[in-house]
Amino acid sequence: MTLIDFLQRLLGRDKPSGAMARERLQLVLAHDRSDLNPELLDQMRREILEVVQKYVEIDLESGDVSLETGDRVTALVANLPIRRARPQASELMQEPPLPVAESAPASPSS
Amino acid sequence: MPGAVTTASARIILICSGKGGVGKTTLTANLGIALARLGERTVVLDADFGLRNLDLLLGLENRIVYTAQEVLAGSCRLEQALVKHKQEPNLSLMPAGNPRMLEWLTPDDMKTIAKLVAERADYVLIDCPAGIEQGFKNAAAACQEAIVITTPEVSAVRDADRVIGLLHTQGIQPVQLVLNRVRPKMVANQEMLSVDDVTDILALPLLGLVVEDEQVIVSTNRGEPLTLNGNGDRSPAAQAYRNVARRLRGEGVPLIDPSKQRRGLRARLLDKFRKTGNF
Ligand SMILES: Nc1ncnc2c1ncn2[C@@H]1O[C@H](COP(=O)(O)OP(=O)(O)OP(=O)(O)O)[C@@H](O)[C@H]1O
Ligand SMILES: [Mg+2]
């Protein structure tokens, strides 16, 4: 490490490469371990949102479905802030389960 | 029959990494010698049929007559193929056969060889080829437990993770970790993955920690592993390999993280500023 590197580090302009290695590894291993390719993950994310939206109105902007890893276990973590319950949601109880795409009610915003 | 008892207790340990060139063969040779010096009857089994090197690291390359190939074919007896180390007669090498063996070798063949040598050993160390293809699968089939070795680099750790996943699905256990070629100064300056980083990410118990050490290359040139008597007395890597051997036997040898020992002024300053968040 040269003096310039050191000063830059002190000023917080330059992240140490050890920390970058750690972060990049954690991300890539989350995907390696789940064995899901990005397209599949994206599809799963969309379908989960569809299902959840049948019951509650969620904040799509701040919501997130992602893979997180730690201790050799990869978890699918969904963080979906709820705006309000859907008034029609209770009706869903009476109906027999239907394929997701057909039973999803049109959301008022779309 | 005393023979039957020892068979049951022989530990068959795979030494693997996923990525090539991270130190599997060096560890196998040094650990083999170290265990032998502790009085354990040890056989090192070269499962890297494509690119065999274990004979060279042990300085036994000129003494090979028969190999695992002839043993499997039944054209020689086991004792004829095993090459005994001159200085450490507790250690023997089972040499890898011709690279063309890869075309027909099966996991069952490896099991057969490992079981045969296990009959006259306390420890069998299998030097695994790099990769996760057939060579790895053959070697993994023959073992009960495994040591995964990696360096603190992203590609090596990623490949180690793949291998650990495969070992877990095959029910091999325990699986322990050796971290090789650690550069304490770089870790202290946070320019290298730390010991904690790697053990956290891979979630394996740490069996050993080997620093980057030029003596490793010198000993390889000579065909005399650092753990040999009178060799590597001032080599930190030699000490690390010996400690791995003792921990394997269940001795509680403390692990010391060299990067936490003598931290430079720069590293300590950086830490301080980071914590106070002043910058
Ligand atoms: N702690 C160390 N310090 C310095 N050099 C090392 C250390 N460990 C291993 N090496 C060097 O790294 C190189 C690769 O080591 P080795 O052959 O043991 O790796 P390997 O995993 O068996 O490789 P392969 O996948 O090709 O079988 C060698 O040149 C060796 O001398
Ligand atoms: Mg090798």
Image (tube, coloured by chain):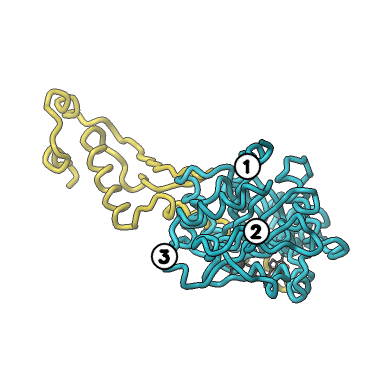
Residue B240 on image: x %, y %: 77, 56
Q: Which residue is mark 2?
A: B79
Ranked by sequence position, the earlier of labels 3 and 2 is 2
Q: Quadrant of residue B155?
A: bottom right
Label 3 packing within 10 angstroms: few (<14), some (14-19), many (20+):
few
Q: Is residue A35 above or below residue B224?
A: above
Disc 2 CB within 8 Å of nearest ligand 2 atom: no
Q: Position of residue A73 (x, y in %)?
A: 47, 43
Ranked by sequence position, the earlier of labels 3 and 1 is 1
Badge 2 and badge 1 both on one subunit: yes
| Camera-nearest label, 3 or 2 | 2
Judge by depth and name the residue closer to the eye, A107 or B87.
B87
Q: Which residue is mark 3?
A: B104
Q: Which chain is cyan?
A: B
Chain designation of label 2: B
Q: Label 3 lies in what chain?
A: B
Tag 1 residue: B7
Position of residue B122 in the picture relative to residue B235 (left or right): left
Give the image quarter of residue A50. Answer: top left
The tint of chain A in the picture is yellow
